[in-house]
Image: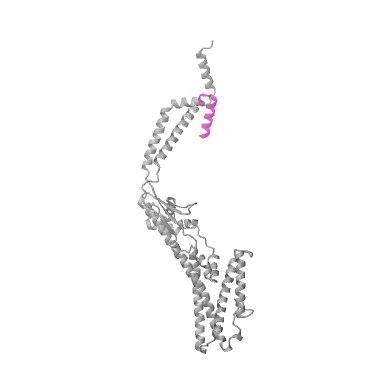
Amino acid sequence: MIDAESIGQAEESSMAAAPREFATLDFLILMGRRKRFILRFTLGAAVLMAIISWLIPNRYTAATTVLPPQQSSVSSNLMSQLGGAGALAFLAGGSLGMKNSADMYAALFHSRTVEDAVIQRFGLMARYRKKTMVDTRQSFEWRSTVVVGVKDGLIRITVEDRDPKVAAEIATGYVEEFRKLSANLAITEASQRRLFFQQQLLEAREKLTTAEEAMKSMEHSTGVLQIDSQARALIETAAVLRGQVVAKEVQIQAMRSFATEDNPELLMAKQQLTALQAQLAKIAGAGQDSGSDFIVPKGRIPEAGMEYVRKLRDVKYYETIYELIAKQFEMAKLDEARQGAVIQVTDTAVAPDKKSFPPRTIIVVLVTLIAFLGSCAWCVFSERLERMREDPAARQRLDALRATLR
C-alpha cells in the first residue's frame, strides 16, 4: 500500500521539478499568506498620498459666458426703399463677404495682444514666477480655456487660480481686454460696410465739391444762364439715371465674382441695367452709355447754354452718387449701433466657493487601488521567482539573465 507520506513526497518532487501555473485557489492562498504585506503597503500608500494631496494648494475656476455678435442686418429690410442704392450695399456687404464666426472670436481671445494685456494688467509674470513673457503666456493658456458651445454658440471663458477672487477678476478682465482689441478691429459685417462707405463718401464729397466750385467759377466768369425748366429737368434726370447705371454695373461686376451667368439674381440685375440704359438713351440720345460723357442733344438747349449744361450735369451726377453712398453709410451705422458691443456678457464671472482642483478623494482612492494591485502583482512575481530558483534549469537561466544585465 502507498501511504500518505509517499504521496506527499511525490507531490513535492513534482513541484520541485518544474514551476506550475497559478490557479485561482493558489492565488488566494498566496494572498492569504502575504496579507500583512499587502495591507501595510496599500495603507501606507493611501496615507502618504492623502498627506501629499492635502499639501497641494487648492485651485478655483471662475467662468464667464459671452454672446458673440449676431450678423443679421436691418439694412436688408431697407433695400427695396432705396432703389439704386441697393447696388452699392451689395458691393460693400456681398463682395467683401464678411461672415461672423464664434470660432474666430474664440481665436482672438488667444491672440498675443489680448493675452499680453491681461498678463500686464494683473502682473501674472510675478504671480506665476516666470522670467519671460513666452513662459508666462504658456502658463496663462494652461490655466485658461475659451470654448465655443456646439449647440448654443456661446463662448465660455474659464480662468483657474489659487485665489477665487483673483480668478474671477482675471476672467472679467480677460473679456474687457478683448473688447479693447475688438474696438480697433472691423470684424463685423456692419463695421466693414461702414468703413467702406465712409471712404467712398469722402471721395464723392470731394468730387461734388470740385464740380460745384467749377460751376460757380463758370457762373462768375460768364454770368448765370437761366435755362427753361424742361431742359433743367432733362439734365437732372439724365444725371440721376447715369448714377444708377454706374451703380448697377458695379453690382453686376461684383456678382460675377461668385455667381454664374445663369444665376437668377444676375439675370434680373442685367435686365434692370438694360432698362436703365434704355431710359438714359431716350434722354441723352442714342449711343450714350453710362460711361460716356453724355450731353443732352444740342437741339433741345440753346448753344449758349451748353457750358452751363455741362457743369450742371456734373453737379447733379455727383449729387446722385453722394446721396446713394450717404444712405448706405447711414444704414451701416444703424446696423453697427444695433449690434452694440462686439460681445455681450451673459454670465458675469463670480468668485467660486468650491475648489476645482485637486480632487483629493479621487486621488486617494485611485492610488489606493493602484497600490493594492501593485502589491498583489509583486507577491505573485516574488512567488514565481522563488519557485524558479528551486528549479536548476530555471536557476541557470536566471543567472544568465543576471550576467547579461551586468
User: Dominant secondary structure of the magenta stretch?
Assistant: helix
Residue 256 is at least partly visible in this image: no
Q: Is residue 390 magenta?
A: yes
State the residue in front, 266 or 83.
Answer: 83
Q: Residue at x 49, y 88 (%)?
A: 220
Question: Residue 86 occupies which quadrant of the picture?
Answer: bottom right
Residue that sits furthest to the front in the current view: 230
- Horizontal side, residue 142 vs residue 395: left or right: left
User: Residue at coordinates 52% horizontally, 14% vertically from top-left?
Assistant: 6
Q: Nearer the viewer, residue 228 or 379?
A: 228
Residue 87 is situated, as x and y percent measured from the top left of the image, at: 55, 69
Q: Which residues are magenta?
A: 386-406
Measured as percent of width and height from the top left, residue 70 is found at 48, 59
Residue farthest top in this picture: 1
Q: Is residue 168 left or right of residue 207?
A: left
Which quadrant is the N terminus positioned in? top right
> Is 111 one of the magenta-colored residues?
no
Q: Position of residue 176 (x, y in %)?
A: 40, 59
Vertical arrangement, residue 131 with respect to residue 253, above or below: above
- Closer-to-camera residue (383/395): 383
Query: Which residue is more in the foreground, 159 or 240?
Result: 240
**Residue 152 rendering spot, x and y as whole percentages:** 48, 53
Total numbered labels: 0
Q: Is residue 204 above or below residue 363?
A: below
Image coloring type: one colour
Residue 173 visible in image: yes
Is the residue 78 above or below the residue 287 in the image?
above
Q: Is residue 231 left or right of residue 157?
A: right
